[in-house]
Amino acid sequence: MNNQETLLNTLIDTENVLNGYTHEEIGDDHLYTGIDTPMKANAFDMSDEEKKENIAQLFAQIMDVMGLDL
C-alpha cells in the first residue's frame, strides 16, 4: 500500500513554524525572523506600479506566444 502524504494529512510542527513569533508580531516584516522566504533581495527596488506595468507587458507576450488574443 502506497501512503500518499498531502498537506491535509501531514502533521506540521506548529511550535517552531514562526520561530516563536505570532502572525501578528511578524506582520509583513520577515527581515529579522530567520524565516526563509522566496523573496529576492531586490524585491522592493521597483515600485508596485512599475511591477504592474512590466507584468502586463510580459503577460501580453505570453498570450501572443500561446496564440491567444487579449
Image (cartoon, rainbow, N blue to C red):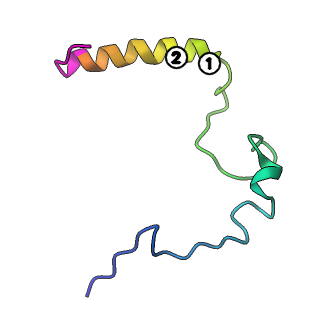
Circle 1 SS class: helix
Q: Is residue 22 above or below residue 52?
A: below
* Relative image position of residue 44 (x, y in whole percent): 68, 24
Residue 23, x across and y down, in percent: 75, 54
Q: Give x and y (percent) for residue 54.
A: 48, 14
For the residue pair 12 and 38, the one nearer the viewer reads as 12
Give, as a single range, the part of the protein colored magenta: 64-70
Q: Is residue 43 above or below residue 68?
A: below
Quadrant where the C terminus sits is top left
Counting from the top left corner in percent of width and height, residue 11 is at: 55, 76
The residue at 58%/42% (across/down) is 38
The residue singled out by tag 1 in the image is 48
Taking 3 as reference, is 70 above or below it? above
Number of the label disc, if any, that sits on residue 7: none
Describe the element under mark 2 as helix, strand or loop: helix
Query: Which residue is at a point 67% across and 70% down the rendered structure image?
Result: 14
Q: CA distance from mark 2 to mark 1?
A: 6 Å
Instruction: Give the dominant element type of the magenta stretch: helix, strand or loop.
Output: loop
Kind of residue indicated by mark 2? Lys
Q: Quadrant of residue 27?
A: top right
Count up the numbered dots: 2
Q: Is residue 22 magenta?
A: no
Residue, disc 2: 52
Q: Nearer the viewer, residue 33 or 67?
A: 67
Q: Can you tell which quarter of the image residue 62 is in?
A: top left
